[in-house]
Each structure stands twice: as C-alpha cells, then as structure tokens.
Image: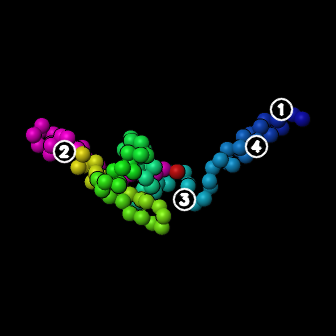
Amino acid sequence: MSNLDGLARRATTRYLRVSSLVDWSASHRIGECMFRILHPVGEVAEQLGVGLTTAKALIKTGELRSVKIGRSRRVPADALHDYVRRLDAEQNGDGAAAGTAAPSVEAPIAIRH
C-alpha cells in the first residue's frame, strides 16, 4: 500500500464520519438562509437569553403572545420582536429623551443551516 492509498483511505473515512452528521436535504444547503415565522419555546428562551421556565411563564402570563399547532406551542416572530420593543420602551423610554434612537429589531431572525 502506497502512502497515497493510506491518505485517500483516511480522507474517505473522515468524509464518511462528517457526512453522517450532516443532513444533506435541500433545505440545508450551504449558504441557504431560511426565516422562521413561528419559533419553538426553547428557541425563544435561547434568543432572549432566559431559561425555558421563564419563557413558559412569559407565555402563560400573556406577556409573550403564542399560538398552538396541535400540541406544540409556538411564538410568532413578530410577537418576539414586539415583546423586546415593549421591554425596551418600558426600561429606556422612547429613546427621544436621550437623543438616540432605540435599537432596531425589525430584521427577521435568520436560521442558517
């Protein structure tokens, strides 16, 4: 066995290990960007930087609007943005008093695969 054969075998083994971890379906192509309209509660908790229990409490109290699809609870993207805007307005005012505009959260949340 030549040194080149061993190198090719190692490269193939690495490729097979990596390719088994990657979902190669059409929605996961490199560079493709997908925007979600509805977010699972766990993802919302992660985006807000809070725990799952806190995210569920925000939904239960009505502070964060959500919808049900079957048995799953989802948070619309605009409801997430509205909640952050409301928090910002409550804690920092409308931004005019300080002479600076409030940070924009208009851009949709991108999920890169």
The residue stretch that appears in magenta: 88-112
Q: Return the disc, 4 or 2, that comes first in the chain's sequence.
A: 4
- Asked if the magenta segment contains residue 89, the reply would be yes
Q: Return the disc, 2 or 3, that comes first in the chain's sequence.
A: 3
Q: Secondary structure at mark 1?
A: helix
Q: What residue sits 35% from the left and 54% below the top?
A: 59
Coordinates of residue 50 in the picture (x, y in percent): 39, 41
Query: On the rendered structure, is 28 left or right of 62?
Result: right
Structural distance between the alpha carbons of marks 2 and 3 = 39 Å
Between label 4 and label 2, give the one nearer the viewer: 2
Of the numbered discs in the image, which one, if any, rests on residue 3? 1
Of the numbered discs in the image, which one, if any, rests on residue 63? none
In which quadrant is the N terminus drawn? top right
Of the numbered discs in the image, which one, if any, rests on residue 27? 3
The amino acid at mark 4 is Thr
Mark 3 touches mark 4? (CB < 8 Å): no
The amino acid at mark 3 is Ser
- Residue at the spot of label 4: 12
Structural distance between the alpha carbons of marks 1 and 4 = 14 Å
* Residue furthest right in the image: 1
Q: What residue sits 48% from the left and 67% below the top?
A: 70
- Residue at the spot of label 2: 90
For the residue carrying disc 3, how many other residues have a C-alpha within 10 Å: few (<14), some (14-19), or many (20+)? Answer: few
Q: What residue sits 36% from the left and 49% below the top?
A: 57
Structural distance between the alpha carbons of marks 1 and 3 = 38 Å
Coordinates of residue 80 in the picture (x, y in percent): 33, 53
Between label 1 and label 3, give the one nearer the viewer: 3
Coordinates of residue 96 in the picture (x, y in percent): 11, 43
The amino acid at mark 1 is Asn
Taking depth in this image into account, of 77 and 108 the one nearest to the observer is 77
